[in-house]
Amino acid sequence: AQRAMVNALVQTAEESRLEPIGVDLLPFALVRAVGSGNGAGMELEVTGDEAVIDVGADVTNICVHDHGVPRFVRILPSGGSDITLAIARALGTSDEDAERLKRGEALPEGPPIEDVRRVALGRAASFVDEIRSSLEFYAAQSPGSKVGRVLITGGGSKLEGFTELMQERLPAAVERGHVFARVRPDLNMPEEALREAEPVLSVAVGLGIPGRQG
């Protein structure tokens, strides 16, 4: 990690009158939150390693692990915002309207939703190819290893058709990661709202789960 980035986070914590006692990495937190077969009673049902992929707005975290032990980490500088920008440029809308369109909201006098989906999935396909290349690089650098299962999470993964696109382009079983299978939500929210919130809570929950010691 870059020293300046870590120092900025430490300074923020100290100015909040908190004492930093350790540094954690988001990919490791994701494995603790939704990863299978890591000692939490969830065993893999497919052969091979498992990749947990969190699609954020500007950054996508990839972590391949073997029963909770990280084997490969890669951070891609792209995410859901790239799809929003592609919609705005292709269909001549503002970034704000493009974000609403991406979420499936029809706008008065806006472009047809079919055009929005076409542009969104076209940009997402290029993004998925970047993910596939990262997993292929891992397999090439680790003889005898292969990714047999992919779990996706993060706000960017909520794009309609994204899971199906991943399944088409990746030679592995693709599923959504379910953080609420690991922890019980104690939130006063309707079930539908919980389902909408679940993909964006994986990092926060994972950072709250203690890592392995030693």
Image: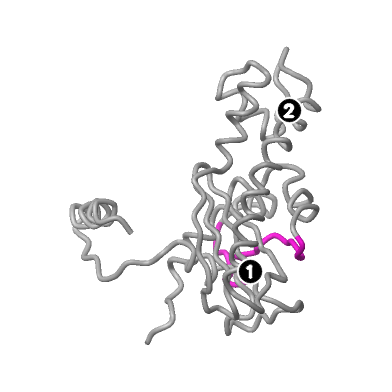
The quadrant the C terminus occupies is bottom left
The picture places residue 37, in percent across and down from the top left corner, at 63, 80
Give the secondary structure at mark 1: helix
In the image: residue 187, left or right of residue 158:
left
Above or below, 18 relative to 96: below
Which picture quadrant has residue 156?
top right
**Position of residue 12 in the picture relative to residue 182 (left or right):** left
Which region is colored magenta?
A: 171-187
Q: Residue at x 56, y 43 (%)?
A: 79
Whether residue 176 is situated above or below residue 192 in the rendered picture: below
Residue 199 x/y as whole percent: 61, 54
Tell me if residue 104 comes above or below residue 4 in the rendering: above
Expressed as whole percent of the image width and height from the top left, the position of residue 145 reads 65, 76
Q: CA distance from mark 1 to mark 2?
A: 35 Å
- Dot 1 surroundings within 10 Å: few (below 14), some, or many (20 or more)? some
Where's the N terminus, which quadrant? bottom left
10 Å crowding of disc 2: few (<14), some (14-19), many (20+): many
Q: Which mark is residue 116?
A: 2
Q: Residue furthest bottom?
A: 214
Q: Secondary structure at mark 2?
A: helix
Magenta stretch: includes residue 169:
no
Q: Quadrant of residue 142?
A: bottom right
Which three-letter amino acid code belongs to the residue tagged 1? Ala
Q: Nearer the viewer, residue 34 or 184?
A: 34
**Which one is earlier in the sequence, the residue at label 1 or at label 2?**
2
What color scheme is it?
one colour
Tally of numbered discs: 2
Front residue (pair 159, 181): 159
Q: Which mark is residue 139?
A: 1
- From the top left corner, tell me how far across and down residue 27 is, in percent: 49, 63
As displayed, is residue 26 above or below residue 36? Answer: above
Please give the name of the residue rendered at 49% of the width and 55% of the height, measured from the top-left corner. 75
